[in-house]
Image (tube, rainbow, N blue to C red):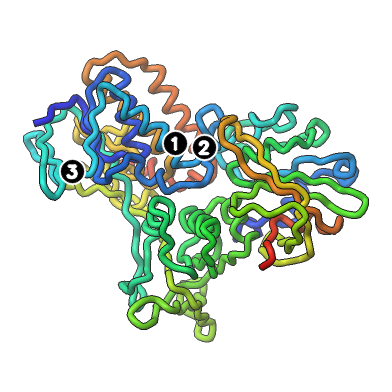
Amino acid sequence: MIEPDVLVVGGGPAGMNAALAAANAGATVLLVDRFQNLGGQLVKQTHKFFGWAARGAGARGFELAQKWEGEIQNHPRIRTLLGFEVIGAYKDGIWLAADLEDFYKIKPKRVVIATGASERMITFENNDYPGVYGAGAVQTLMNVYGVLPGERYLIVGSGNVGVIVAYQLLQAQAKVEAIIDILPRLGGAYWVHAAKIQRAGVPILLKRTITGVYGEGHVERAETIGVDEKFQPIPGTERTFSVDVVLLAVGLMPLSELLFELGVREYYIPELGGFVPWHDETGRTSHPEIFVAGDVAGIEEATTAALQGRISGLQTALDLGYEVNKDEIDELKMLLTQFRRSSLSEKVCQGLERLHTKGV
Amino acid sequence: MIEVDGVPTFENLKTSMPTEERMRKKAVAMHECYQDIPCDPCVYSCPTKAITMETLVSTPRINHELCNGCGLCVAACPGIAIFLMELKEDRGLITLAYEFVPLPNPGEIVDGLDRYGRAVCEARVERVYSLPGIDKKTKTSLVRISVPPEKIMEVRFFRRRE
């Protein structure tokens, strides 16, 4: 039995920062991630991050992961359990982490769930064909393992993920035929991200959806069709793309199954990506010993995930009687508010407001 | 339109464009950042304090008279949305951040691409160098290309020829 002050589930930007904040305040931390490396989605992010110059903006995602990983590995109060998945949470406060051969029982005093999100899928004919990938999978293959899964790509979805992967594919010298989106305008991509792939020759085709992929046992071509204001297909606007990969970047859903198991109160908030656990400003859920941080608390992005992680980590330490500078928590909350003051965070703010008006 | 596909129109460009007179004097930075992204490295990269921003989520303002054309903001901008502009008698010089390998070679003839990736003119690679970001540790490659002077507001990227 491992008995840390704080169990952190998930080693992405939120989890790493929760672990560091809690441990720096004096708590002992067990950080579990199902992958062999810390960093979560950061390890695939080769673009420069926005944010405050004074707080590391301009660094590329994987550089941030390396920095925090280094601090964690050298921290005397953080133990990591990599390659292990937290597969159970029991009413008596015991958590279970396992790989294929071994398992650990964990009895923490506080838990920070920072499990992130999973990718959404959409329906079209043969969407189970080899060659249909989630954006995250292609990023992992390409940026972590150095493998390009195909030569010619059609990207579905013009959010930041879609346009950023398009750019990374161009950097890897792949051919990106187009990005399509069913919406009449960009599906959430920042203008500068969208602009830099278009000037490099990747068209963004709006009001268009995918109807199917075809080929001899794997994707050889994708069929698309234009849609009207009601998203209904317009006959005669069909267009075929000769591609071997269709990359889906159609959104993310919070990964909150562990919290379901414990009966933590959740609400369906579309602006936050689906079912999200109710939580206060520090990430505390309806279960007073369990916190959430990062995408599992509502789909947002890495900078806010890191700030949320810091806040939750400090709050767990404060709960347990460690000396925490409350000004630091307030400053982090202020930074989060400042960051979210952008119109780009409007939806998230609306979602959080809706969540907060719901009762615990 | 920028709200539709993120590509700035002339209306947007007008708000951040240096004057022709200024571009003839020497190189000057021009940003194409028209959205309230929470981001401020350009401000801190500028040695002459030519770039200002009211809050983290404001769009930057470049004082073209204070700008000395050093290019540090071009390397610092996470959105790859700042360019150096300079007008010579017979050509326009555009310096852009280039995150691709292999790097082009000085003297190479390439296709000048507009904001939609359409080849609009022949361009020549004039200089390939790199400048540090605000962390002073990592560097970003910059490429200076020359285009016909009338294309200086149109070309924003280039494509190497086979």
Disc assigned to residue A86: 3
Residue A5 on image: x %, y % = 19, 24
Q: Are marks 1 and 3 on the same chain?
A: yes
Distance of mark 1 from mark 2, alpha carbons? Answer: 7 Å
Quadrant of the image occupied by residue B157: bottom right
| Element on which disc 2 rests | loop
Q: Chain of mark 1?
A: A
How far is disc 3 from disc 2 in space, using C-alphas? 31 Å
Q: Disc 2: which chain? A: A
Provide residue B58's location: percent of width, then percent of height: 62, 37
Q: Amino acid at mark 3?
A: Val
Q: Is residue B116 left or right of residue B124?
A: left
Which residue is farthest right?
B89
Q: Quadrant of residue B122?
A: bottom right
Residue A195 at x, y percent in the picture: 62, 55
Q: From what the image shows, is residue A240 above or below residue A58? A: below
Q: Which mark is residue A59?
A: 2
> Looking at the image, which residue is at 35% across and 44% down?
A40
Q: Nearer the viewer, residue A245 or B54?
A: A245
Among the two numbered marks 1 and 2 on one chain, the one whose residue lies closer to the N terminus = 2
Type of amino acid at the residue the image marks with label 2: Ala
Mark 1 sits on what residue? A64
Q: Is residue B49 above or below residue B92?
A: above
Chain letter for the residue marked with disc 3 in the picture: A
**Picture quarter with the C terminus of chain A:** top left
Q: Are marks 1 and 3 in contact (CB under 8 Å)?
A: no
Residue closest to the far left? A92
- In whole angstroms, how far apart are the C-alphas of marks 1 and 3? 25 Å
